[in-house]
Image (spheres, rainbow, N blue to C red):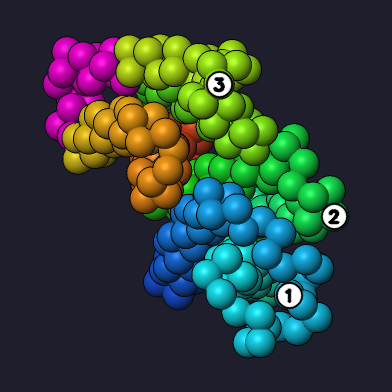
């Protein structure tokens, strides 16, 4: 019986190793590539959405989901119509990409980690909600709160996608630094709040009213004030990484980009105000920087997953048999 048990353990162990190797060699690279494409598509979606808002093109297509009743409105095409049309096209492509990842995770469910289909189903749900708010922005004639929620869901999609990518990249790391994650989460949360204020600022015309008539300046002043705790928290992260040499060694590329984005974001914000918000390039650059800022912070937070990501329960039980 003992020899038969040992033989059974060896057989189960070889099956587990074979499945694990197939996952890492065949399926994992596909999900990684699709994840990278999703991040770039989401950043482009956020930036194009910002450009659409800055150029006052949010209602350039008066209907939804088509534009002037067609998929490609050649007869009505101009810069504003193109921005709104391209924004919708990018949103559609993001939705298709996430739906494709979800479908693959269902098809390959037995060969991939348990958490992948669940997280992709969450992404798919967020895409549906995002599309619904996209429709509401047109139906509600660019209502400020609808536009704001639309952007925040896009940021949530970006954060979720990056977290999945990092878990795929580092699934075998077991000991994260929780305090380091919490330290990084603080400026991420502040940046999301800052983005919320920024969208309210542009969608209610508060900035123009404040700069032109010195009225309704509360939102603009709040937006300015929030830059200070964000800058302080980033400098604290850099100082902590320098003090803990290993953190600086492992993350210096991301931290260098973070410092660059912080100072360039401040410069772009100042230039936007100095030009009375009349230069779209500064405002769009400001939105791009905010997206990259959130992406880098999220990457740093999720570089080390909380626990080792195991395979399906059946495979996990096989691993227990090997250990025995």
Q: Is residue 179 above or below residue 258?
A: above
Which numbered tag is attached to residue 213? 3
- The location of residue 113, given as percent across then percent down, is 58, 56
Sequence-first tag of 2 and 1: 1
Looking at the image, residue 69 sits to the left or right of residue 237; the answer is: right
Dot 1 corresponds to which residue? Answer: 67
Span colored in magenta: 234-252
Looking at the image, residue 161 sits to the left or right of residue 264; the answer is: right
Is residue 236 one of those drawn in magenta?
yes
Report the residue at 49% width, 32% height from top.
Answer: 306
- The location of residue 126, given as percent across then percent down, is 71, 50
Q: Residues within 10 Å of mark 2 (few under 14, many from 20)?
A: some
Dot 2 corresponds to which residue? Answer: 139
Residue 197 in which image quadrant = top right
Q: Name the one closer to the observer, 171 or 12.
A: 171
- The location of residue 276, given as percent across then percent down, is 42, 34
């Amino acid at each position: 019986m003992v020899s038969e048990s040992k033989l059974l353990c060896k057989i189960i162990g070889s099956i587990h190793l074979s499945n694990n190797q197939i996952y890492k060699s065949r399926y994992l690279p596909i999900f990684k590539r699709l994840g990278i494409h999703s991040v770039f598509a989401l950043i482009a979606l956020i930036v194009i959405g910002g450009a659409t808002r800055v150029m006052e093109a949010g209602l350039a297509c008066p209907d939804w989901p088509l534009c002037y009743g067609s998929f490609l409105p050649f007869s009505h095409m101009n810069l504003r119509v193109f921005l709104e049309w391209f924004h919708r096209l990018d949103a559609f492509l993001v939705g298709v990409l996430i739906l494709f990842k979800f479908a693959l995770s269902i098809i390959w469910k037995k060969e991939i980690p348990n958490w992948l289909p669940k997280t992709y189903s969450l992404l798919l749900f967020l895409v549906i909600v995002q599309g619904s708010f996209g429709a509401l922005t047109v139906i509600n004639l660019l209502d400020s709160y609808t536009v704001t929620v639309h952007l925040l869901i896009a940021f949530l999609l970006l954060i979720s996608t990056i977290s999945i990518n990092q878990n795929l990249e580092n699934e075998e790391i077991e000991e994260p630094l929780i305090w380091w994650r919490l330290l990084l989460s603080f400026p991420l949360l502040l940046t999301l709040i800052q983005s919320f204020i920024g969208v309210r600022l542009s969608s209610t015309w508060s900035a123009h009213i404040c700069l032109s008539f010195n009225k309704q300046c509360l939102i603009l002043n709040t937006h300015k004030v929030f830059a200070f705790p964000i800058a302080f928290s980033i400098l604290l992260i850099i100082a902590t990484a320098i003090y803990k040499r290993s953190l600086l060694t492992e993350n210096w590329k991301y931290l260098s980009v973070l410092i660059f984005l912080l100072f360039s974001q401040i410069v772009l914000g100042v230039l936007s105000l100095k030009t009375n918000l009349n230069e779209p390039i500064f405002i769009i650059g400001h939105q791009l920087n905010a997206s990259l800022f959130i992406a880098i912070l999220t990457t740093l937070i999720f570089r080390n997953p909380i626990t080792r990501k195991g395979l399906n329960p059946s495979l996990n039980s096989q691993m227990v048999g090997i250990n025995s």
